[in-house]
Amino acid sequence: MELQQETNKQFVQQRLNYFRYPVLLIFLILVARLWQLQIIQGSEYSLKAENNRVRTIELTAPRGAILDRNQVSLAEHRSSFTVLLYRESIKDPDATILFLAEKLAVNPEDLESKLRSSRETGLYRPIVVKEVAGMEDISIIEAHRRDHPEIQLVPEPRRLYPYGRLAAHLLGYVGEVTEEELDGKEFPGAEAGSLVGKSGIERIYNELLAGQKGQRLVQVDSLGREVGLLDEKHPVVGGSIRLTLDLKLQSVAEKALEGKVGAIVAMDPRNGEILAMASAPSFDPNAFSTRLSHKDWNALLEDPDHPMQNRCIQNSYAPGSIFKLILAEAGLQEGILGKNTYVTCTGSAEYYGETKNCGDRNGHGRIRLEEAIAKSCNIFFYELGRKLGISKIAEHAAILGLGENTGVDLPGERSGIVPSPEWKKKTLGEPWYPGETISVSIGQGAVNATPLQILRTVSVLANGGDVVTPHLLLDAEYGPKEPEWPVRHVPINEDTVRRIHEGMWKGVNVAGTGYNAAIAGIDICGKTGTAQVVSSETKKRFPGAGDDHAWFVGFSSKENPEIAVVVFVEHGGKGGTVAAPLAREIFASYYKRGN
Amino acid sequence: MDRRLLLGFDWLWLLTLLALSGAGIVAIWSTTDGTSLDSYFGKQVIYLCCALAVFLVLLYFDYHVFSDFIVFIYAAGMVLLVLVLIIGVSIHGNKSWIDLGFFSFQPSEVMKIIVIIALAKYYSRLEGEYLGLKELFWGGLIVFIPMFMVVLQKDLGTAVTFLPIYGVLSCLAGIQKKHIVFLVIVVAIAAPLGWFSLQGYQKGRIVNVLNPSSDPYGLGYQSRQSEIAIGSGKFLGKGFKQGSQGNLGFLPARHTDFVFAVLAEERGFVGSITVLGLFLFLSYRLFRTAREAKDKVGMMIVTGVMTLLLFHMTINIGMVEGLLPILGIPLPFVSAGGSALITYYAAMSLCMGVWLRRYVN
């Protein structure tokens, strides 16, 4: 019995020995896996642990305010909360989506498309779920912090334009920096997600306004609660800037253009400070502060009236009779127009085989420069133009600042065209025909200019020879206290200035074309313009196809020019009847306040 | 007590146990708050003292005392398992605890050891070279009745541990090849049935191991966080209380089931293979004891305990390393918890008793 059990025990012992191998294999596998996790992939997992633990919270710097010359705020920052979703903290995706949809009224389809498009970006990068959280949203999120640690509120300064459409073109708007802008290094210091100025002042002075964003590195636990601050860099608040703009004058200009398509600019002719700059139709820059929907964006882009375009600088037009002022200056400076130089206007004249008409078909009779300016006599200037020749006209137009950018501190300025034989050869490859000179003499043909160029040119005539740089920046908190604006002095005789002023004064005050701009007791000088868009023949065949552009440009007072105004109404009709009354409103408002 | 017994006391063996428990206590201390008697740390120290006392007390008894009276002990264990179904309390969804007021006690833990002794006793009395089908059936009954009771407590993790005990001891006792084939067929039929009886989350855990990236925020979350914890520990670890995964709550059940991940995060590769080395050394001591045991019952008891220990260790570390599904099985000697710790020290005492009494007649 004893022996048999012993034999039996031998078998058991033998079988026991076999167990060594699977046991050793198990240990080998467990160690190999540790080697893989800790040695081979250790750095990779360290990074994952850091991403778990450390959350970077970007602190956006509040953008500086834009003020008018009297410190009234035209653009300012306002705090609001953005709802962010941290995907790495999601525990139950269905519950998260349900919570966002039911409690925060987030459209599930929008959310899903956002999640899909952000699939490639790091999980620790949050997704913006809702742009502007209301008080209700904030309290709901706070109440559910424990259940939904993946949903977080982040304060974010937002841009507010208190006056909406007012001066929208020059102020511009802000938006998230695009990849192309980042690649092109257009905004130094901007990073992905930064808010930058997209147009106008916001864009050109982005650096002064933007400030520097800060950062908080916090340690979070698995519920997403902050349990410690690792590092903090405070944001640097952006500085405010003050514009030369006068809110009251701007409002008058905006109101004058209501329902019209056009532009008004008012400027101090002595130094180029822009007091008002309105372009119609306008847009509401506040719409860009929250993400603009595709539909609204397309509506703005496809509007035939191009509300996003700043007509003061971003489009050039035929100046029409306004251009006669350049001929007058050229004629006087070149000595062609003496004190008693007369032209006889019979209402029409023939030039190079083509009959040209005057505005007054009965003719102005024997007419001198001053009256020719006041009454806008075409024949006088045809004659003058013919005598000057295109090269002299082009030379004087250039001297007075046409055909080149004014240098205004706004993006996207157009330079207009001052035609000359060389210009035509270069752009069209055709020779210059003398008949064209006749058209150019009254501001038709290839010549065109932006309203701001016209205003600056007239300012040169008003101030007696200073080609100023129109500008909007008065001073900046973090920038030049007294920015320097280049002034080019051109020689113009006192007599020239006096005679042109006289003509323009008569144009407004003594039975001239600009009488609608007249204000009793104020010596306003002005010149109207009615620029043909299509030829008279075409217009006869298609009535209503392209009404004339209405212009008025002027300054005041005659003795002491301190404000210059240009009014442009696209397809508005006659300058004297459409544009001049609007200019009158600007002058009236300017003098009512006792400037 | 015999003087020879005292002289033969294996200090290295006991030190290995204390080293494992010590590593566990440090990890618990590092990853939970407080050091008072009421904290996880304090409680674990008290449990360790109790476990040591049990270890020393049990060492005085010859293991034959247990094997000879195993029928009564087995019956008493079954009574406790029935009792737990009636008056038991639920902790983490498992109704397997009896609340003694000062201490929550898990009868299923002790029952594992009782089953080992009972099966060892039954198989050791057989005299042939191989097991017959009848013996295999009776042996199975000894194991499956308490296992079924544990399944009723919804404690799947503990229930599963009965299977390897049955398997390994049956192999040791001389299972025949044809019976193995028969058992494989039974399992093949039972497995799909078992799959359908699993809870949804239990199925998910198994699917998740097969494809962890299928659901990164769902059930895979725990495995993923555990792998991050281990991996980020790198070679030397982050140091005491420096493990972010453990201390910031990214690791689930960090002081119990996932304590090895805390250890690996804070002590690195060096610390984790040291722990594995301690387990390997322990396995060697158990193996040597089994081989040199005086009789078959001692041999089978030690092999059963070794199986239990290695099974728990493999399942736990395999789960923490992301190799196996998440089953609620703690790491022997290391994880926080009293019942399991005391049970293991009792089992070790039993085995060392076999070692010390290998020459005694």
Image (cartoon, coloured by chain):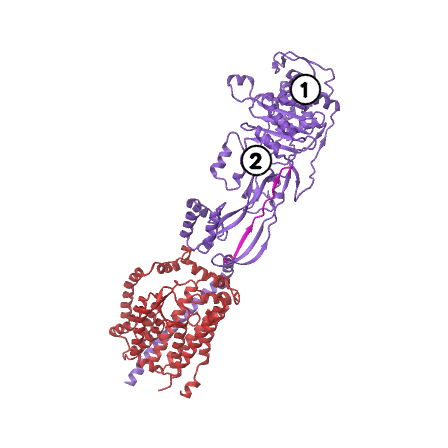
Chain colours: A purple, B red
Binning the other alpha carbons within 10 Å of mark 1 as few (below 14), some (14 to 19) or many (20 upward) gives many
Q: Residue at x 62, y 36 (%)?
A: A410
Report the front residue among A54 and A35: A54
Q: Is residue A140 above or below residue B316?
A: above
- Camera-side residue of B25 and A27: B25
What is the x, y in percent for residue A264?
60, 29
Q: Secondary structure at mark 1?
A: helix
Identify residue for label 2: A168
From the top left corner, tell me how far across and down residue A118 is, in percent. Answer: 47, 48
Direction from residue A183 to residue A19 in the image, left or right: left
Task: Identify the amino acid type marked 1.
Answer: Lys
Q: Residue most toward the left?
A: B134
Span colored in magenta: A51-70
Considering depth in this image, is A195 or B260 the residue closer to the camera?
A195
Residue on which the image places disc 1: A506
Task: Tell me which residue sits at (29%, 85%) in the image.
Answer: A2
One can see residue B95 in this view: yes
The reply to whether label 1 and label 2 mark residues of one chain is: yes
Q: Residue furthest bottom?
A: B3
